Amino acid sequence: MIPQTSLQVKQFFKENNRFKTIQCQTIKDEWVFRSGNHVAEYPERFKRIQINATNLTQALAFDVDHEDPLIFSDYGLPAPTIITINKDNGKSHILYYLKAPVSVGKAREYMIDLYDGITTAINADTNYTGRIAKNYMNEKAFRVYGSLKSYELADFGDFTKKHTKASAEAKKSKISYFSRNCALFDTVRFYAYKTKKDFAEYDDFYDCVHKKAISENQTAFDEPLPLKEVKDTAKSIAVWTWNKSPELEPGKWNWDGYEKKPKEEVSASRANENRKRLKARLSRRLEELKTDKIPISCKFFDKAIKPHKNLSPNYYQDNYSEGEESASMLSEAPSE
């Protein structure tokens, strides 16, 4: 392993942290929210920092309670991006940063299988959420090693084939905390997408999502997640769905997360919308020019009368006879 200096890991954090504000644990054991730049500027103030979110994974994180942080080499795993070792007890966090964060879809399913396989192989803590990690920029509290290299999920392909099947029985008997969290998130978010239209107030919607999350947590897992984690997941889903999700039409989604509409139909619909917006914009502009007798610059006029790729070649001729009028407007324009 390559020991890393504070300057190197600070630079790595700045380049790879995708969250403007992160949750941190101070050296006084207080939980606060700070900007990533602030944490990098004063790393000695924080013991733990947020590296992942409920709906976004930018690093595969493992909590290794035994004193063998090099165990990854026994299974042919790539060199970890960062290994943060506690100076007092020798326990460590192993991090594999990803080149592309994983959110939803098949990549997430693959990532969960991969995560469970690695957790079983290196004997990592199955109750670790992977959301908060030791602050590897705090060189006073931790020794830091690693490659500072980011990976793609495909880089773990050989390991997945060799070890995830072997660990299948172990995963059935004790699903990792990370997997339970992901499974709960996926189930509840699709439920929220469908039920949002039934509510006029956010508070009522959140209560419904929260109750669904509690019910799912109690029935789906032999070892349920802590209630605080369930509440945080429900809140994250409710806030995003209420504020940002589109109004989903019946039949558009199959609620496994995939659109039913063929790609050609979606592309044609988008092109039609672009065409309408372009026509409306040109119509408004030409009306303004006619009404206010605003001089048209030759550059604008030449651009405007060229057939646009989203319009028929004869669109301007069919809808506007602006050539002579625009020319007269140009001739009437006051000279500078």
Image: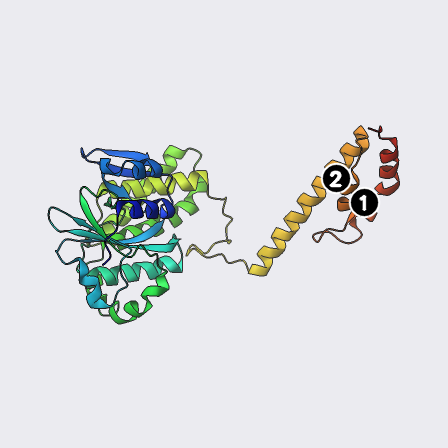
Pointer 2 and pointer 1: residues touching (CB < 8 Å)?
Answer: yes
Badge 2 or badge 1: first in the primary sequence: 2
Residue 270 horizontal/vertical position (percent): 61, 51
Closer-to-camera residue (124/280): 124
**From mark 2 to mark 1, how far is it between C-alphas?**
9 Å
Quick one: SS at disc 2? Answer: helix
Going by the image, does 277 lie left or right of 242?
A: right
Residue 66 horizontal/vertical position (percent): 12, 56
Residue 305 horizontal/vertical position (percent): 79, 46
Q: Is residue 53 visible?
A: no
Type of residue at label 1? Asn
Q: Which residue is mark 2?
A: 283
Residue 316 horizontal/vertical position (percent): 80, 47
Type of residue at label 2? Ser
Q: Is residue 84 above or below residue 75?
A: above
Disc 2 crowd rating (10 Å Cα; few below 14, some 14-19, many 20+) is some
| Residue drawn at the location 27% of the way across and 33% of the way down | 32
Q: Is residue 77 above or below residue 15?
A: below
Q: How many marks?
A: 2
Quick one: SS at disc 1? Answer: helix
Q: Is residue 22 above or below residue 154?
A: above
Closer-to-camera residue (310/206): 310
Image quadrant in which the C terminus is located: top right
Closer-to-camera residue (207/31): 31
Closer-to-camera residue (167/256): 167
Disc 1 crowd rating (10 Å Cα; few below 14, some 14-19, many 20+) is few
Going by the image, does 288 lie left or right of 264?
A: right
| Residue drawn at the location 44% of the way across and 34% of the way down | 200
Q: Which residue is mark 1?
A: 319
Going by the image, does 105 lie left or right of 314?
A: left
